[in-house]
Amino acid sequence: MEDEGLICWLCGRPLGRKVEYHHPVPKSRGGRATVPVHPICHRTLHATFSNAELERQFSEPDKLRAHPDIAKFLRWIARKPPDFHAPTRRRK
């Protein structure tokens, strides 16, 4: 498995069987680089922020982790297994 040993760009936990790739600067906004993330972490990012917000304010993981909603998610997900899945709430 080529992704073995990688950690999630957002939460820092080891990646499981399913790995998705997130564009820190959204592809629709000209981003090309991708980073490995858990599916639940990826869905949480896109359920919390618009592409414009991700591009302008949250293309760096430290800035994302400092956001109150993401910080709460990270505390919740910290002890879950790598392949943990749960429904993701939609944007408000």
Image (cartoon, rainbow, N blue to C red):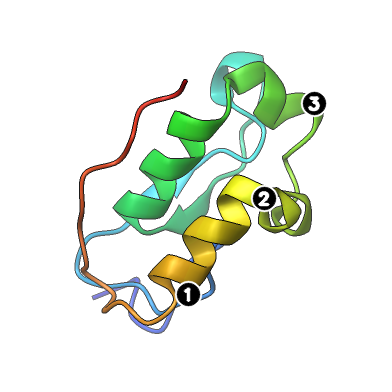
Q: Is residue 34 above or below residue 89?
A: below
Kindly identify which residue carries mark 1: 7
The crowding category of the residue bearing disc 1, from other C-alpha atoms within 10 Å (few below 14, some 14 to 19, many at least 20), is some
- Mark closer to the chain start, 2 or 3: 3
Query: Left or right of 71: which side holds 38?
Result: left
* SS for dot 3: helix
Kindly identify which residue carries mark 3: 56
Residue 55's label in the rendered image is none
Mark 2–mark 3 Cα distance, whole angstroms, equals 17 Å
Camera-side residue of 78 and 28: 78
Q: Which residue appears at 79% of the width and 33% of the height?
A: 57
Mark 3–mark 1 Cα distance, whole angstroms, equals 25 Å
Q: Position of residue 28 (x, y in %)?
A: 57, 15
* SS for dot 2: helix
Quarter of the image with the N terminus is: bottom left
Mark 2–mark 1 Cα distance, whole angstroms, equals 22 Å
Q: Is residue 3 above or below residue 69?
A: below
Kindly identify which residue carries mark 2: 68
Camera-side residue of 14 and 45: 45
Closer to the camera: disc 2 or disc 3? 2
